[in-house]
Image (cartoon, coloured by chain):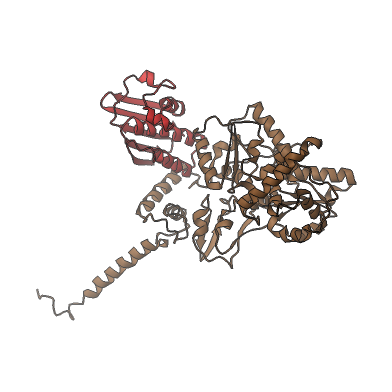
Amino acid sequence: MGDYFHSVRLDEEKCKGCTNCIKRCPTEAIRVRKGKARIINERCIDCGECIRICPYHAKKAVTDDFSGISAFKYKIAIPAPTLYSQFKPEYSRNRLLNTLKTIGFDDVFEVARAAEFVSEATRKLVSEGGSPKPMISSACPAVVRLIQVRFPNLIDHLVKLESPMEVAAKIAKRKAAEEKGLDPADIGVFFITPCPAKATSVKAPYESKKSYVDGVISIKDIYLRLFSKLEKTSEAEQLAKAGFEGIRWANSGGEGLAAGTERFLAVDGIHNVITILEEVENDKIEGVDFIEALSCTGGCLGGPLTVENVYVAKTRLKKHIDEAKAAANSAGYQETYDENIIWTENIAYKPIMKLDDDIGVAMKKLEELEKINNELPGLDCGACGAPSCRSLAEDIVRGNAYETDCIFKLRERVRDLAAQMKELEDMAPPVMDGSRKQK
Amino acid sequence: MGDNLMKLHYDIPAYDLTYAGEASSNVKKLLVQLGIDPVRVKKAAIAMYEAEINAVIHGNGGAADVEISSGRIVICISDKGPGIADLELAMQEGWSTASDEIREMGFGAGMGLPNMKRYADRLDIDTEVGKGTRVTITVNF
């Protein structure tokens, strides 16, 4: 897959080359070149902000096609809890899970259930101590990648537990192999996702060598298929097994509430996350043991691959949470897991902002950058294709842009040139110039 | 390594906490672009931030002069404030002369100078009552 697989991509045909996405990107990973937005691969963290902001729908997330499930003999759907919030509240969670079995899946395992296992392990880690506080959740892959490129000092703060998606996939696969006597290679586990960064995580995982998930299908892509079958599905089978704590993970604050400490902080929205992580890095956050940080506003419910508005989804999820609370599902469901859920790989700092490997060269470039930046108009208009004047200056010293890419600089040059031409035009040769005095 | 020396100057406004910390966050950004080890960047940024805030809340504003070379950063923050009468006392954690108003805003916890000492590789303080204070922070790369 290479170093830089990304789910978030550009649809060339739809892109108008406007400046909406370049200005919104939290890692300054987009430039407009030749009228089209270009994503700088090593900087992209797959947060999906550009998908949300693009008025022309030119940014898309590459997920797997539904037809891909047919490549496996035994197909298991593992839905993110966000899926429950996408449909009218009169449809119960159990009906929804049963419906997944009518559209082609042989079995279902709730990621919400795995989230409860992850919460259990998190509570243990938080109470044990030993790790630098505050511990930062690694559940949101965009936040993990953000930390990797912008907050290297916080890598040690990450809770290095696998995500509920991975844990669900592992358990579902093992159970199917044991109970049905299947060859694991014949079992396909498909994550139903609100999130493009999860698709990236499956193709290019950072916490292990290989993901247990075989495919990632977006909620958007599966929505109509489910919707048309919901009405007629029977609820014969009891598939809803997760408790309210796991379902609540879809909400901002859900994971934090289950972390086993009053001293938790929940932040959502990638730009808010950056503000908080900066405070943590500067030792400005006191009295916090656990941080839940989610890239999307509203948490996973606000994922770019969802169908329903995040606030409507929140209200709908609440009903499912309350129902699960009343049924006390997980209390009566004594399944355990014996999977190892600790990361087997780690992430390393990617210094994407570094100007050069040689500090002497980097200093020369930085001085040049400051000089150029001081001469730019400071409007951050984006017409040059870079998100700010400073980033244009940075692109220039990296050799990726010219000063005249700035339309104000270009105009200055044209004006100077015009003045020079005018001056030359005024200077007629002496044989033609009657006004010149004879010496 | 060449003898490159980068000099920067920032004015620090008096009593304006809205923009306090801007100079240090700017310097942090530059150090990241230079590819300095993240741990060193953090040390320099926090030590400078504390000195900057002190100049804002105690020193009636002032200036930051920063010199970056390939081996170290030297941050000099000077103010024309009241000066520090008892430096030994001021170096103690939790000791502060900040007003209640400043404390209500979350500053003045008496951690400024102790934090500077903790994060700087070398800290020089030059202060005179009635004249002002100059803090020089060195962090080696």
At 25% across and 75% down in the image, what residue appears?
Answer: A425
Vertical placement of residue A379 versus A135, above or below: below
Q: Position of residue A295 (x, y in %)?
A: 59, 47
Query: Residue A84 appears at what percent x and percent y?
Result: 71, 50
Residue A123, quarter of picture: top right
- Decide if residue B56 is on the left or right side of residue A340: left
Q: Is residue B30 visible?
A: yes
The single residue placed furthest to the left in the displayed view is: A439
Left or right of A320 on screen, residue A419: left
Can I make out residue B107 in this image? Answer: no
Reply above or below: B129 against A39: above
Front in this rendered view, residue A400 or A302: A302
Residue A17, horizontal then vertical, whole percent: 51, 64
Quarter containing the C terminus of chain A: bottom left
Chain B colour in the picture = red
Q: Nearer the viewer, residue A105 or A438?
A: A105
Indicate the quadrant where residue A72 lies.
bottom right
Which of these two is toward me, A323 or A293?
A323
- Residue A19 image offset from top left, x and y in percent: 49, 60
In the picture, measured across the screen, residue A30 lies left or right of residue B16, that is right
Name chain A's colour: brown
Q: Left or right: where does residue A225 sit relative to residue A273?
A: right
Please report the residue visible at 45 percent of the width from the left and 27 percent of the height from the top: B115
Q: Residue at x 65, y 40 (%)?
A: A254
| Circle count | 0
Dividing the picture into quarters, in which one does residue B56 lie? top left
